[in-house]
Amino acid sequence: MTVYVLRRLAQTLLVLFVTSALVFGGLFLVGDPVEILVNPNADQAEKLRAAAALGLDRSVLEQYWIFLRGAFTGDLGRSFVFGRPALDVILERMPATLEIAFLAMLISVCLGIPLGLYAGLRPADPLSKTIMAGSILGFSLPTFWVGLLLIILFAVELGWLPSTGRGPTVEFLGLQLSILHWEGLRYALLPATNLALFKLSLIVRLTRAQVREQSLLDYIKFARAKGLPRSRVIGVHLMKNIMIPLVTVIGLELGSVIAFAIVTETIFAWPGMGKLVIDSIFQLDRPVVVTYLLVTVFMFIFINLVVDILYSVLDPRVRLSEAKG
Amino acid sequence: MAALGQTRAAAPATVPELAIEGGPLKRFVAEFFDSRLAVAGLALLVVVIATALFAPLLAPQNPYDLGKLDLLDSRLPPGGTSATGFTYYLGTDGQGRDMLSAIMYGLRVSLYVGVASGVIALAIGALLGVVAAYAGGRFEQFLMRVADIQLGFPAILVALILLAVLGKGVDKIIIALVTVQWAYYARTARSAALVERNKEYIEAARGLGLSAARIVFKHLLPNAMPPLIVVGTVQIAHAIALEATLSFLGLGLPTTEPSLGLLIANGYEFLMSGKYWISVYPGIALLVTILSINLVGDQLRDVLNPRLSR
């Protein structure tokens, strides 16, 4: 187990290194941020001064070396646009992204598992067919377009919910959260629903598929034959076994929700880190883009690791030491 | 990780090993037509593809010909008419472009990008996967590790990074989509080929002294195809949605030949003033396209999945 975790950590460092090098080099080739940052009427001398101030007058290898040296001491560079440490800028926006991501996961798990269970246990039922048809629809709807529809319906036509920005926040454990504030929650509702839709369909489909496959297996037949009540067969025997793949997927989807928040935040002008990174890509604010990637890559790897460990806890048949981690 | 890898592969589109057995084609067709929903999906898909293919013949206007556009006609609601008596059934966009024509041409771009990236990714991924399964050893380990790591990251993030670095263009977005998709095919092809590899006909082929290339291309690859086709349909739908999303973010295609995603993005700024049609209609076209592919893919999976065979 320890060896496994250590090996994964080494792999993490390698992935972080490769990502940073690729993005650093790539963004260097895309364009010169100085052209975007300084006043278009600035003369050559002024541009050179700005470049020198940002450290952009050096060769790309030199710049990368400086970045790497800084990275080991926790300094990931200063944002060209904000003039502050890039990590601070990202961390400031992170709670906003995490709260809609969690809210979205909560919605999809709380609705998805019961619906999937129902559809799996009664495959011929008309309601099950409706659920499944709905899930294909949810699967096929382009998320960003649904976001626009939600805005048209709930903000423009009905005027029930606000469609842009983040509402008032409450400080909780040092984080600024809006979902704990009644008015703030109203602002978070549309983005979170939008983000949840795809995941909801995924969880419904996965749960149903698992239920259908597992119900045919001998242990379920045996439990029934023993005369156990239906609620116990489903609630204990079946649930335990369908939870294993579900936990994996839910864990991994949490990562993808955080990434997909880039789109949702852009549509709803939600001030999270996804919106920040899109703006930063257009402004060639390299330190912010690189830092965002390093932070998210790190988060994903962390989530994956937790899922793997959880997996071995849930399913005693899986031994991490055997797996070539 | 090997054990975990298998269950994870199950998430996107699970197709265990085997192909169809018995009297194949006839039973396959009969089973496919079992579901009315799937038939409807297939019919829709045919309409969508035909519209895309024959867009220049069907479209009332050439939306790329700027000389034909009249700014005075911009943002007309559906059913509005121009001064020359031309009816815009789905309204016009901010530049006075007929939405119906723009959607037909946009469909072409979206389908082209989706199918091209899907086919290239299938070719690359399937080949790598089958070779990995056949060759084994270091190459297999390395390839599957790379696929594992890459699939650990959401496709949208990988594509976003690539496009931020590559810039805009049809070729660039195809490169990005191939990069995010190859791993799915590689994994599916490998697991299918691993099962096939130990079967007697492969042993017989080896015993006959056939070359490795011949065994891989003529024996392994064709038998690994059914699951790849299922993954392929799902992936093409994904690719089309992903391209639309990236274009919506302003990171995909150039504005000269707008895909459906770009058309939707163009309507975004008019949304708040109630001019819904610029975003809504291209979105419906996108939805119908993806939905029809998914309906067909869903039924294909059920029909080709031996675990659920009736």
Image (spheres, helix red, strand yellow):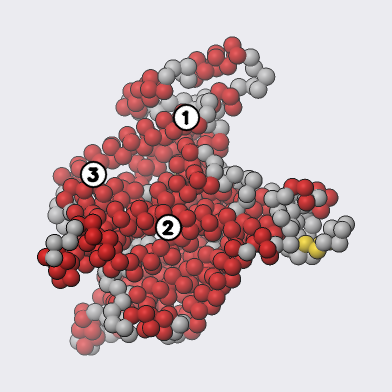
Q: Position of residue B8 (x, y in %)?
A: 30, 59
Crowd class of label 2 (few under 14; some 14 to 19; many from 20; radius 10 Å): some
Residue identified by numbered label 3 = A8
Q: Looking at the image, do the residues carrying marks 2 and 3 touch, with CB atoms under 8 Å apart?
A: no
Q: Nearer the viewer, mark 2 or mark 3?
A: 2
Q: Identify the residue position indicated by label 2 in the image.
A: B119
Please state which of residues A324 and B20 is positioned toward the viewer in this rendering: B20
Q: Nearer the viewer, residue A75 or B62?
A: B62
- Amino acid on which the number 1 mark rests in the picture: Leu
Report whether mark 1 lies on the same chain as mark 2. Answer: no
Chain designation of label 2 = B
Do the residues at discs 3 and 1 belong to one chain? Answer: yes
State how many labels appear.
3
Q: Amino acid at mark 2?
A: Val
Lower sequence index among marks 3 and 1: 3
- For mark 1, name the chain: A
Q: Which residue is pictured at 17% across the width and 61% down the height?
A: B210
The residue that mark 1 highlights is A29
Q: CA distance from mark 2 to mark 3?
A: 33 Å
Furthest residue toward left:
B207
Element marked by disc 2: helix
